[in-house]
Image (cartoon, rainbow, N blue to C red):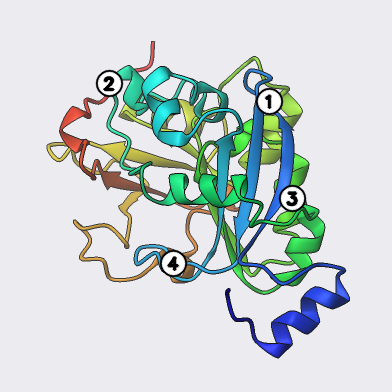
Amino acid sequence: MAKFSKLFVAQCAALGLPAANGYTIYEGPSALDGAPIVVIALVKSSNRKTGNMVQTYVLTQATRPTAAVKSGADASICGDCKHRPFLGGSCYVVVAQGPTVVYKQWQAGAYPRATAAQVGALLAGRMVRIGTYGDPAAAPVGLWQALVAQAAGRTGYSHQWANQALPAADRAALAKLVMASVDSAEEAAAARAAGLRYFRVMHASETLGAREFACPASEEAGKRTTCDKCRACDGSDRAGKASPAIVAHGGKAARFIPILSV
């Protein structure tokens, strides 16, 4: 059984929550295709790149992550993302690890149900990673707004910034919280023209464009800081700021080919 500090237990009690390592903050239809999904917020993280941020997982309810990426059921949480393994993409996430562990714990009932506002209050002053796995656009944007309302800051990314099937108001609201994920200089230009800050995945042979900088937590930038300290990937609230880019990485990085916007 996990051990919690007296202060954390007291904070949970004040909010009407049991002390837990994580909480289920959404169970409902995906905004991408209507299939049932679940969103889990984890209290602690040992991620070396991001630092000790609150991590959030967007998962399909009916299918284990390892099976979902093979069958294509991950479209419910990842939409048309070009990096999906089902499409032969270069996604760096090892779904057999974090996402699968979280999924199993959710199935076992380890994550009590709570509102995003409750968890946001519990973790006030912390950094939040919106969509550690899964695209945040799959869940209601109000969920993320409530979760980060009292946060010290947030990071997040979405490939759905140009998805016309989603309400424009929802896309605009989400864009204030997370970065537009882009995979080519052409997509970067389109995002910039739309007034969005973006995070570009690039091939090792490419160079940085105008108003771009190498992700400071990346291998190529010497891993000189972590995401919780950098805080650059916080969406378009700072529309005039430059955008970061990173060389494709992870076990499937060799699959990455910049895909030009059509």
Asked whether, in this view, residue 157 is left or right of residue 244, the answer is right
What kind of residue is marked 1? Ala
Between the C-alphas of marks 2 and 3, the distance is: 33 Å
Disc ID at residue 145: 3
Between the C-alphas of marks 3 and 1, the distance is: 16 Å
First in sequence, mark 1 or 4: give its number.
Answer: 1
Residue that carries the numbered disc 4 in the rendered image = 230
Check disc 3: other Cα within 10 Å, few if <14, some if 14-19, many if 20+.
Answer: some
Q: The residue tagged with tag 1: helix, strand or loop?
A: loop
Asked whether, in this view, residue 158 is left or right of residue 32, the answer is left
First in sequence, mark 2 or 3: give its number.
Answer: 2
Disc ID at residue 88: 2
Check disc 4: other Cα within 10 Å, few if <14, some if 14-19, many if 20+.
Answer: some
Between the C-alphas of marks 2 and 1, the distance is: 24 Å
Which residue is depicted at the point 51% across and 38% down? 134
Residue that carries the numbered disc 1 in the rendered image = 31
The relative height of residue 241 versus residue 200 in the rendered view (above or below) is below
